[in-house]
Amino acid sequence: MGLRRAQLYASHEDSRHKAIAQRIEEGKRFLISHTCQDGGWNHGSQKALGYAADSYPETTGAALLALRGSPREQLSASIERAKKLAAACSFSEGLSWLRMGLAAHGETLAPKPASSKARNLRDECLEALSAKVSEGAVQL
Amino acid sequence: MPEKQKLSRRDLLVGGVAVAAAGFGAVAAVSSRVSSSRSLAIPKPSQVAILRCESYRQSIYETVSQAVDLCRVPVAGKNIVLKPNLVEFEPNSVINTNPMVVHAALEAFRARGAASVRIAEGPGHRRNTLDLADAAGYFELIPGFEDLFTDLNLDDVKSVKLIQPKSKLKALYLPHTVLGADLLVSIPKLKTHHWVGATLSMKNLFGVVPGGVYGWPKNPLHWAGIPETIVDLHNIFPRQFALVDGVVGMEGNGPIQGTPKTAGVIVAGNNMPAVDATCCRLMQIDPEKVSYLTGSTVPGEIAANNIRQIGETIDGNSTRFALIKDWQDLRLEPSSGVTGNRG
């Protein structure tokens, strides 16, 4: 009885992990298929009436973070776009997501500029988390 | 075709007094209407003010004040919510409502005894609304902006049942801030729009729908039918005022990727379809071919002869806004004579 339960548990765990892994892969494929022409990500529409839509810092950073473990060559344009967005971004939330997204692919952003200010507790938390991720103190 | 006329400021003020009773009546009637029965309450003709405003400079404060006075907006003791159009971080673009127009409205309503004036917006694309407002110049221009501002994407919400909806929606969750307002002031930019032809005071109401409930870019509204949802939203709010930033608008592939187009006008009125129809005519777009305008109105509501233009005329101030290929059939040729009725 004990063995049977262990076997069932093992198979359940196995299928649960498989299902999760499958969903993760679906999610990654979704993100890749919704990459903007410039390499980054926005709210989800790459085009409107045939015109390419630009990507945003926060969504690009979050998408890169979600795509950790994906082949770097598949994401080279996205990483370059993230660096460009970071260079132009003066807002705390966008920079925090970009910092974490780039860190997921081995890239480190310079410390945040003084002009970028956290507006609320969420921004503060994101800043603290992204700093830890960037330092390697938090494992992705 | 109405004769082109130019009015002095004094003429405008005298004219404002002349239309006072009618204007106030319009607001009172609009206030009493319910979401399902606009057709019972819309007065005819509606008044729409067109005022010249060549650039974003100090004189815009006086121009907006004149617009508020001309339209006899009931302000004293009211809780007013200003709803600008904030879309994207592009400091030098014309995507967003210019903050000077919003600040001018804020000051005009305060000076006329409003109990409170708040600014509120729920952008459809970007989640960090305060950063967006900062990039658009709102923090710099409007003192204490953060204390005056409500992010409608994150506000508390209440479910509102739609009575006789035009769209596929049965109800909408809407923010307390706008539902509790005595007067909702839509302050859009004068822009063409690649999906509905033109985006003005009615389409601007998409921004009151909370992203926190419907996500970004609020696709449930798109799936329910954009023109129909615009109409449903407009019908929810009984007390409205429209103040359109048409100083520099956007033509072509609006509302984001179009090009700046100077129109040099502020357009205002208590009846949003009438204001939007006037704006269309100013852009040389036929409002009777814009589906959310025809779908929103009682018969003849947006007809040129049912709108009294206060201040400047359409004929003397229309500017040909470029239209993308898909919307060429919206073009209103100036020679068609459908340009408005001189009030």
Image (spheres, rainbow, N blue to C red):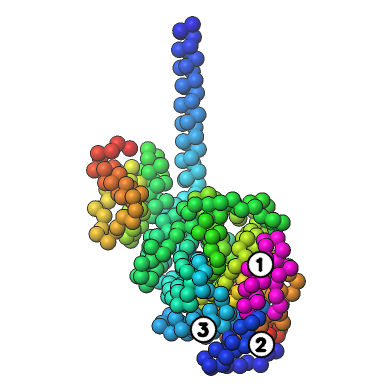
Asked whether, in this view, residue B211 is left or right of residue B132, the answer is right
Residue underneath mark 1: B32
Could you tell which of marks 3 and 2 lies nearer the N-terminus?
A: 3
Above or below B190: residue A53: above
The subunit letter for the residue under badge 3 reads B
Look at the numbered disc 3 and give the secondary structure of its residue.
helix
Residue underneath mark 3: B66
Viewer-closest of B125 and B311? B311
Which x, y percent locates residue B139?
A: 36, 67
The subunit letter for the residue under badge 1 reads B
Q: Which residue is at 47% across, 36% downward?
A: A25
Asked whether, in this view, residue B288 is left or right of residue B68, the answer is right
Q: Are marks 3 and 2 on the same chain?
A: yes
**Residue type (three-letter) at the residue carrying disc 2:** Arg
The subunit letter for the residue under badge 2 reads B
Q: Which residue is at 35% across, 49% downward?
A: A122
Residue underneath mark 2: B342
Viewer-closest of B228 and B253? B228
Tell which tag, 1 or 2, sits nearer the viewer: 1
Task: Give the alpha-carbon distance from disc 1 to disc 3, as whole Å.
Answer: 25 Å
Could you tell which of marks 1 and 3 lies nearer the N-terminus?
A: 1
Task: State yes or no: residue B30 in magenta.
Answer: yes
Looking at the image, which residue sits at the far top? A1
User: Which range of residues does the magenta coloring cover?
Assistant: B23-45
Looking at the image, which residue sits at the far front? B77
Could you tell which of marks 1 and 2 lies nearer the N-terminus?
A: 1
Task: Give the alpha-carbon distance from disc 3 to disc 2, as whole Å.
Answer: 18 Å
Look at the numbered disc 2 and give the secondary structure of its residue.
strand
Tell which tag, 3 or 2, sits nearer the viewer: 3
